Amino acid sequence: MDGRSDLEKGQVDESGSVDRGWIERAFKFNVDLSKAVSPLPSTCCIFKVPEVLRRQKVDAFQPHTVSIGPFHRGTDDAKFKLVENVKLWYLKCLLRRMTSITLDSLIERMKELEREARGCYSDPCNHLDQNDFIRMLMLDGCFLIELFRKAPDERKQDVDDPIFNVPCMLQYLYHDLLLLENQLPWFVLECFYNLIESDNHVPLSTVVINFFRDSVADPSIFSYRKSESTIEILHIVDLIRTSLVQEHIYDEPEDPINISGLPNHLPQRIPSAGTLSEAGVKFRKPKVLEAGSPGCILNITFKDGVFTIPPLVIDEMTDPLFRNLMAYEQCYHSCTHKITSYAVLMDNLIDTAKDVDLLCEKGIVANWLSSEYASKLFNDLYNDTTVIDFVYKGLCRRVREYLHVHRWRNKLRRDYFDTPWSTISFFAAFVLLILTLQTVYTIQQFYHSPN
């Protein structure tokens, strides 16, 4: 009892009657509490990009040509109309081509997967009932597998197919299919792949990686070892991230002394490539790569004043690709922040267009765009992101230690040994100092020697 009257609590009005509105609100509140569940279960792996990240560059997260999954379905029918018609046509052609597959059998199979598939999305997708959701899974899943099947083999491409006879279409699709919001669960894709390509012994992961290798200027950026094909894949963006980070080698020892005073897991800045170069730091790309391995772009090292950085090609796909991979790392609970860490370190090294030019000269960056664009790309890339367990903390510590030890040496070289005349002057002054000290010592010995 809190000593307040029912009137003070709002449960009765001044006449003493019960406040029915309060009872109804309390009842509704209890119903809401009984229905409350976690808004983001651990099964979620396909997310709507948080607004704080989206606002940095809206276009990097927005599909232009095709909607995959529920998030953008029905949002702009005119924009997606062409490919929606292609989806229907692809499914019709599939059913004609493969007599072992019927529409009813596909519907039944998707019914079995519907609940699990819904659980993969961060949004409950209430705008799609069971029939609409199953229709989406069938059309999108069939479209993607047929696309991956036809792309490498012109014999499988129909002359009336706008995906392949309109030159710009594939480029648009590369962009849209690598968006975090534009994904189907991997087990849905595998279901269709096993039905359509039952005789194909090439893993779906390899087929997808080969498809996206044509989307970037440097195909070697994507690698996926067949021996590691048992790794659980959640969707296409997850596969692409895995292909980028799976060969990352941790060579960063724990920082025994935290000289910065900041938590060890947080990123700590180092000077730009131009500033480091002026301080005597050298930049180079790896000399020898393992046979058959393109080299992981994350394997950046610093030793004895030398930065070794695997090459990176910067083109139109670089910005949206990295932004969506980083958004995935920010949202999914089981993702380490490796791509985000890479973006932070590259932002440290690339401050201005001159830094881009320096790394281009060393063969580390192949820039298909302007130097100004490339520098702005990395300067803005990780804005409003969080970096947990920064993977380059040991590297940054070694860079700072190198600069601390070599700063006096570089200053001495710059101030006193920059030209032959300055070197001669330094040694002449040194000799003169020695002679002066010797003379003073001799005079002191003369006046203080016993008579």
Image: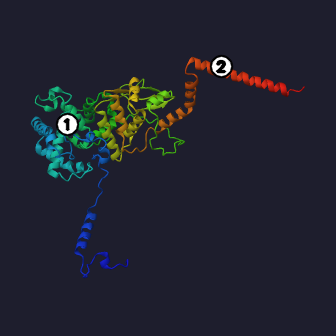
Is label 2 in contact with label 1 (beta carbons under 8 Å)? no
Q: Which residue is mark 2?
A: 428
Mark 2 element type: helix
**x and y percent of residue 49 in the render?**
29, 46
Residue under circle 1? Answer: 145
Does dot 1 land on a helix, a strand or a loop? Answer: helix
Residue situated in front as seen by the camera: 121 or 6: 6
Q: Residue furthest right?
A: 451
Say left or right for 59 vs 428.
Answer: left
Disc assigned to residue 131 = none
Residue 251 percent coordinates (x, y): 46, 35
Drawn side of residue 224 relative to residue 137, left or right: right
The answer to which of marks 2 and 1 sits earlier in the sequence is: 1
Q: Nearer the viewer, residue 109 or 253?
A: 253
Give how far across and how far down residue 101 sits, in percent. 13, 40
* Type of amino acid under label 2: Ala
Quick check: 94 above or below 13?
Answer: above
| Quarter of the picture holding the C terminus | top right
Query: Residue 347 falls in which quadrant of the image?
Result: top left
Q: Quadrant of the image for the N terminus?
A: bottom left
